[in-house]
Amino acid sequence: MAKVAAFLSKLEVDRSVNLSKLTDRAKMLGMLGFEKIVWDDPSWMFTAGPLTILSAKRSGTPSIYFKHAPNIGAQDLIGDWATVAKTLFCLRAHRANQKLPNHQTFVAAISYISHCVGRERPLSRLMPEDLDSACRLISTHYKESTAYNLHKAINEFAAHCDANQLCNVRFEYKYSGLKRPANAGGLAQKRLDAPENLEKSTGDRIIDLEVFKLIGSLYQNVPSNHKYRMYILMLVLLACVGRRFSEIATLPLQDIGADSEGRRFLRYFLMKTSKGDNFHPVDKAWLPTDAVSIIEDVITELTDITQAARSTAQEMRIVGGPDLRWIEPYAVDHRFYIADLEALGFSFNVLRPAGWLTKNGLTFPDPDKLTVQGIRPAKPSRFTTKQGLISYCQSMFDPRLNDPVRIATSGQVYHQEDLFFVRYAGMSSGGVSVCVVAPVTHSMFTTFIRDHLELLTSEYGGGNVTPDFSSHDFRHTINTLLNDGGMSDYVQTKWFGRKYANDTKAYQHTSREKRALIYQEKIREGKIGGSVADNYIQLPVEYKEAYLKAKITGVHELGTGMCTRNLSQSPCPNHLECHAKCSDFSWEKDNVGKKASVVRAFEIEVAQYENAVTKSQSSRQGESHQWMAHSQKKIETLTAMLGDFQMDAEAIKAKALGAQP
C-alpha cells in the first residue's frame, strides 16, 4: 500500500462530508499561479509558480486536463470524480514538488477508475474490484513502463481514500499485478559464451537498425517542399550527431567548420552546462567522417527551406508583432473569401461559424456572391476584410516569441532568425500561419513521430516500421555503439559534450556479459595493466584462454580502475583497498580520462606515507609500521599506473610533498 498522510486532521463518519471538507481545504490554498483558475473548468492553465517550470528549466504556460484518458474517450470528468481529481491535484501540488506530468498521470489514473465505475456510482461506493478493473484496463492500453506508473498512481489514490475516509470500505490496496519494468533494475545472469552476447546491444533505449535505414529512405524520398521535411532533416541530424533534442533544435545558423587538422564540426549550445537559464556555452559537435557529406547537404537544405520563416522572424522583432508585409498590397476594402484564404495559406475554417473570425464578428455575408456555377446560394457566402485578417494575425502573436532563444556566455544574443529550425506556427484550425513563426519544440517533434511518421513510412519509406523511439534514444544508441567498439569513456564524454565521465555510464547499455568479453579482448591486446594482465602474460599459451574465462566473469568500474571479482559469489575481502596490490584490480592503460584521479590518489598516498614515517620516528609509534607497509603497497600500484600513463611518479611525489606544511 502506498504511504500517504491524511490531508484532514478531523474525519467525519459521512464520506461525502469528508470529500467536501477536503475540497474546501484545496480551494483555500491560494497557490502561486492559481489566481485565475475557475474550479469548474475541465482544464486549468498556470501562468506562474513551480508548475510552469518545464523540461530544461524553461518556463511556459502549461495546462492540466481533468478529462478521461484519450484511450477511453477523453470526455470531461464529472461529479465526485472531477471533484476528487481537482482536490487531490491541488493538495498534492501544495505538499510535494512533483512536475506537471506526474500530476497528469495521477489524474489519468483516476479517470480509468471513473470509467470502470460508471457515471452513476459516487466515489463513496468505490470497491476494490473497481480498482483491479482499472489496472487491468490500463495494462491493455499502455506499454509496461507507462502502465507501471499508472498502477502506482492508482495505489496512491486508494491510499488517499483510506487516509481521508472518502469511501465506505477501507482498501489498503496494492494491485496484485504491479510489475516493475525489466529495464528499471534487477540482475540477470547469462553465460559469457551465449551467442546473444556477441550480437549487437539491445534494450529499450537502443534504436533498431531498421529505423536508421528508414530515416535514410525518407531523407532520399520525401520531397523538399513537403510540410514534414524539416522533421526528417532533424531526424538525420539526431541519427548522425547524437546530440540532445534541445541542442539540435537550437543549432545556430552556420556553415560546417573545420579545425587545423581538417576535422569537421558544428557549433551548438551546450545545455547541461549552461550558466543559469539564459547563458549557454557554445561548443563544437565533432562530425563522424562518413557522415560529413550528408550533414553538409542537410545544412544547405535547412538554410534554404527556412529562409522565408527566418525573414518573418526578423520582421516580427522589428515591428514587435506579426509579419504583415504580405497583406500590404491589398486595399482596405478588399474582400477575402474562403478560396482567397486558402490561397494565402490560411485554413478556411476561420470563416466557418465556429471560426475565430466569425466568433469575433469579423466576417460578413455577401448576398451578391455567386457560386462557380453562377448560382446564388441559399446561405450567402461570407468574407472578411483586411482589418479582420490583421486582427487574426495579431491574436496569434505572442510577445515572448521575440525573446532571445539563447544567449551565449560570450554575450552574443540569438533570436529565432539566427537558428536553423524555425517554422511557421500552426493554428488551432489546423492550418499554418503566414505571419508568425515559432521554434520547433519537443512536443511538436514527439507529435510528428507519434502521429505522422508511420504514414510517411508507408508512402515514402517502402516499409512498415513502427515509430516506437524518442529523440533521446539516438544519443543512447550511438553512445552504446561507440562503447561496444572500444572507444574510451574519456573520449565518449568529450565527444558527447558531457562534463563528467560518470554521466557517460548511464548511456552505455552494453550488457555486463558483453562488457566482460570486451575486457577479455583488451587483456589479449595488452591494453590492461595490473595483476590479472601480468598473470595472463606469464601463463603458457595453452592456459591463457582458460584463465581469462575463469577470471573475467564480470567487470566493475572503480573510478581509477576496474575490479574483476565476481561479487555474486562472495563479498569483497579487500573492500576499499583496491590499490593495495589486490589481485582483482586492473586498469586500462589508454584511458587518459582517469589520469587526474590516479594522480590525486598517488599524491594523497605519498603524503600519508610520509606522515607514517614521521610517526614511526616519534616516541609514540603506535601502529605506524603497519601503516607504512600498507601505504607502500598502494604507492607501488599507483606508481605502475602512472607509468602506464607515461607520467613521472617521482616528479608528482616531489610536488605533493613540497606542498605539505
Image (cartoon, rainbow, N blue to C red):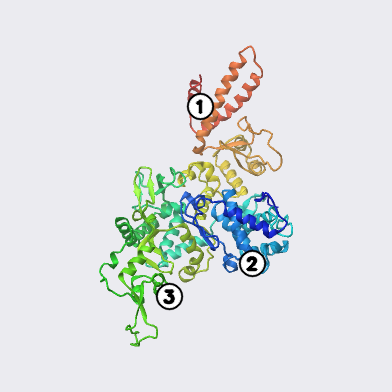
Q: Residues within 10 Å of mark 3 (few under 14, many from 20)?
A: few
Query: Which residue in the protein does label 1 denote?
Result: 649
**Is residue 199 among what the camera can see?**
no
Give x and y (percent) for residue 498. 48, 44
Give x and y (percent) for residue 412. 34, 46
Query: Which residue in the protein does label 2 denote?
Result: 115
In the image, taking residue 459 as reference, residue 422 lies left or right, namely left
Q: Which mark is residue 353?
A: 3
User: Observer-nearest residue: 529 or 441?
Assistant: 441
In this rendering, the label closer to the viewer, 2 or 1 = 2
Give the Cα separation between the discs numbered 1 and 3: 83 Å
In the image, taking residue 35 as reference, residue 311 lies left or right, namely left
For residue 171, which quarter of the picture?
bottom right
From this view, report whether residue 612 is shown above or below residue 360.
above
User: Mark 2 and mark 3 in contact (Cβ < 8 Å)?
Assistant: no
Lower sequence index among marks 1 and 3:
3
The amino acid sitting under disc 1 is: Ala
Give x and y (percent) for residue 661. 51, 19
- Secondary structure of the residue carrying numbered label 2: helix
